[in-house]
Amino acid sequence: MGSLIEKVRDAFPWYQCHKKVRAVKIKEWSVNPDGSIRIVPADEGVEPFTVAGDFGHKIHSVDDPGYFVLYEDGYASWSPTKAFEEGYTRLA
């Protein structure tokens, strides 16, 4: 018996991404004493930054730091490295 996702996945329609986002590859991240998340970017010239603690729930893998993604409307998300790099091309 498979998971719900395995059962319904083939019934879902396909979508192709065409959004522009701002993103930075994460070198490492850690939880601060106050519960916020400190992100150290892999990109040179981008300083480490802190986001609210609830962002930690978006990170799905300890082994893959992934990408911090910021959409035009201000929504911040996390993407696994492979999925992000297959779906987005750096513009500048």
Image: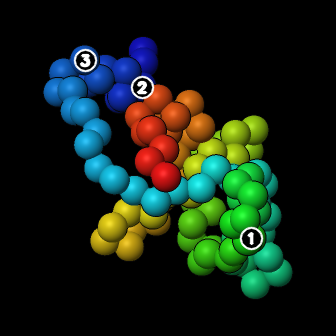
State whether residue 39 appears in this view.
no
Seen from the viewer's position, the closer of residues 80 and 45 is 45
The N terminus, quarter of image = top left
Left or right: where 82 falls relative to 87: right
Question: Is 64 or 44 nearer to us in this picture?
Answer: 44
Q: Secondary structure at mark 2?
A: loop
User: Which numbered disc covers residue 10?
Assistant: 3
The amino acid marked with disc number 3 is: Asp
Left or right: 83 as drawn, with respect to 67: left
Residue 54, quarter of picture: bottom right
Label 1, residues with CA under 10 Å away: few <14, some 14-19, many ≥20:
some
Q: CA distance from mark 2 to mark 1?
A: 37 Å
Q: Amino acid at mark 1?
A: Pro
- The vertical placement of 33 against 24, above or below, is below
Colour setting: rainbow
Residue to which mark 2 is pinned: 3
**Image location of residue 53, percent across then percent down:** 63, 74
In the rendered image, which residue does mark 1 sit on? 48
Instruction: Look at discs 2 and 1 and give the one toward the viewer.
Output: 1
